């Protein structure tokens, strides 16, 4: 180790013989080791020290805003179909089977798209893939809004699900890799607030647009208020994707790819934005990585993995080899333990969340139907389901496809559920440093499991609304916290891929849950309640096996 200093101009520290060489210049400082920069063993610490010198300010708030809007946009994109379905059923003359497939199409797209985007993000870059996913989501959303036939509308909604899951899985790692240690977990937890805003915004936008008496009809084309609603929800994806062009690639990812100079340029820009000082005054002047962790690329090429072109067969083969090696790394020690645990947690949590959240509006409807037929009578969920089903089978439906428009109570109930999430959305980021992300995971899942059991004892639309609010608040908090924890659990070259793999398990479970839940609830409503409560409770217990996070630097 070599140390040299010049007190006349600047004190300088140069380290050699390690994986990374960082030169740090501290003006007018003879005691150049006093600030704790003498620790150099391991890339993580050295990068974190350089990251801390960028400060925390304008750049980080701007990045939180755009990543928050991406997460808000995913909340809208995932649940939009529930508001579109009644109107689209009329226009496309959909049967019950058709409606089931349309509801399943975006979820199927998420199952297929999750790992695809994760592989791309861990090889081609976070920013590039985020932009691609957002633009694809926006364009497919606009095209679906003008689709005139059922199968084409369903196809575009499939691609919407395919794209939006990429944005959802990448925004947490992308945001986290810019954050200094002491701020990272708190900043990531603030994304939960944006999810809540999305849950609130969607029924608000739907309530404004869908009831409008608006339509444009020709012999071959029709465009009604629900089409306008779909288009309005698609435009933000395009705008956010274009805004993201002005943000840099993750410096942590660039360093992992061996592009140290580019990573240093990003840190300089962050420093200039946060401090108002010129980027040339950034105290870290050299940041070079000698050992490459990208297995296949480091063995066969000196090029950055980001520079490989899919159009060239040899480079495509190299890229696929890299993806395969990274996938194998997730499935063997030391990462296998956390890969399995996070996939199981996501499966139990996401299956329960998406299935029950989609079913709650149906439950509102069933209670309202029962209370209108049997005023001043109380009944359980199981009793309501059986009575309403028997009654409906004996009725003659005058219009098979076009029934009543969405009742205002549906918009109102969904809005109230979103508003109920605000307290937990503030509680998480404000207290995560004191209580730890692990506490929030265990607490939210165990209590959500208890709330699910409570569904059996619901005897009115009001009690159903209360339980719906508690369930939404706790499970959405749990989903966001899982993403926060995973940023710390896996190294940079596997981080998005690990999140995507767990997301695939979660979305797969949600797809299965939605397909079987309607059948189970009508057959024996105790079975699904016990099943999903058990899944949440087991997921909560699995969270106890995760380590405490948010204290150390990212690998």
Image (cartoon, rainbow, N blue to C red):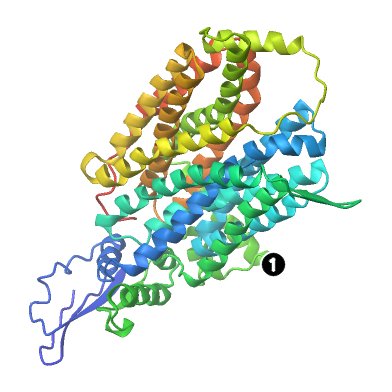
Is residue 295 shown left or right of residue 29? right
Secondary structure, mark 1, is loop
> In the picture, which quadrant includes the N terminus?
bottom left
- Camera-nearest residue between 72 and 6: 72
> In the picture, which quadrant includes the C terminus?
bottom left
Q: Which residue is mark 1?
A: 311
Residue 141 vertical placement versus 83 (above, below): below
Residue 318: name its quadrant: bottom right
Residue 54 vertical placement versus 502 (above, below): below
Give the class, few, some or many, for how many residues have Cα within 10 Å of label 1's Cα (few <14, many ≥20): few
Q: Position of residue 554 (x, y in %)?
A: 33, 55
Is residue 217 shown left or right of residue 346? right
Looking at the image, which residue is at 37% across and 76% down? 269
- Camera-nearest residue between 272 and 193: 193
> Could one spot residue 333 in this view of the protein?
no
Q: Position of residue 313 (x, y in %)?
A: 69, 65
């Amino acid at each position: 180790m070599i140390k040299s200093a010049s007190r006349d101009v600047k004190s300088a520290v140069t380290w050699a013989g390690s994986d990374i060489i960082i030169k740090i210049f501290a003006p007018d400082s003879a005691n150049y080791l006093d600030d704790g920069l003498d620790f150099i063993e391991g890339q993580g610490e050295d990068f974190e020290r350089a990251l801390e010198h960028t400060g925390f300010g304008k750049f980080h708030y701007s990045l939180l805003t755009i990543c928050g809007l991406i997460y808000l946009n995913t909340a809208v994109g995932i649940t939009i179909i529930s508001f579109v379905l009644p109107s689209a059923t009329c226009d496309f003359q959909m049967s019950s089977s058709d409606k089931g497939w349309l509801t399943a199409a975006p979820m199927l797209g998420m199952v297929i798209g999750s790992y695809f985007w994760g592989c791309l993000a861990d090889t081609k870059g976070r920013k590039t893939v985020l932009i691609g996913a957002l633009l694809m989501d926006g364009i497919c959303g606009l095209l679906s809004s003008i689709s005139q036939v059922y199968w084409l509308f369903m196809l575009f909604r499939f691609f919407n699900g395919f794209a939006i899951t990429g944005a959802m899985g990448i925004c947490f790692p992308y945001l986290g890799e810019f954050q200094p240690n002491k701020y990272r977990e708190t900043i990531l937890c603030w994304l939960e607030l944006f999810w809540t805003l999305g849950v609130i915004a969607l029924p608000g936008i739907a309530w404004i647009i869908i009831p409008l008496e608006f339509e444009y009809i020709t012999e071959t084309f029709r465009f009604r208020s629900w089409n306008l609603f779909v288009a309005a929800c698609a435009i933000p994806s395009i705008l956010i994707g274009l805004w993201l062009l002005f943000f840099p690639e993750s410096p942590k990812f660039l360093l992992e790819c061996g592009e140290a100079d580019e990573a240093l340029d990003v840190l300089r820009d962050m420093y200039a934005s946060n401090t108002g000082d010129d980027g040339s005054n950034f105290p870290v002047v050299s940041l070079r990585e000698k050992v490459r962790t990208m297995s296949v690329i480091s063995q066969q090429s000196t090029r950055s993995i980001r520079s490989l072109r899919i159009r060239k067969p040899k480079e495509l083969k190299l890229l696929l080899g890299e993806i395969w090696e990274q996938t194998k790394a997730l499935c063997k020690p030391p990462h296998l333990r956390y890969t399995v645990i996070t996939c199981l947690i996501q499966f139990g949590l996401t299956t329960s969340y998406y299935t029950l959240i989609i079913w709650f509006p149906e439950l509102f409807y069933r209670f309202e139907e029962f209370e209108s037929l049997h005023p001043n009578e109380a009944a359980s969920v199981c009793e309501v389901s059986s009575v309403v089903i028997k009654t409906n089978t004996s009725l003659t439906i005058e219009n098979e496809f076009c029934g009543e428009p969405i009742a205002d109570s549906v918009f109102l109930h969904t809005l109230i559920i979103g508003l109920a999430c605000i307290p937990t959305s503030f509680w998480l980021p404000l207290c995560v440093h004191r209580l730890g992300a692990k506490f929030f995971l265990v607490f939210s899942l165990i209590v959500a499991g208890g709330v699910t059991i409570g569904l059996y004892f619901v005897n009115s639309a009001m009690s159903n609304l209360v339980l719906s609010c508690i369930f939404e608040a706790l499970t959405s908090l749990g989903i966001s916290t899982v993403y926060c924890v995973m940023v710390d659990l896996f190294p940079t070259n596997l981080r998005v891929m690990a999140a995507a793999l767990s997301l695939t398990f979660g979305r797969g479970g949600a797809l299965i849950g939605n397909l079987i839940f309607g059948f189970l609830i009508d057959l024996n409503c105790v079975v699904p309640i016990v099943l999903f409560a058990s899944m949440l409770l087991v997921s909560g217990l699995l969270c106890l096996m995760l380590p405490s996070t948010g204290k150390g630097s990212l690998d």
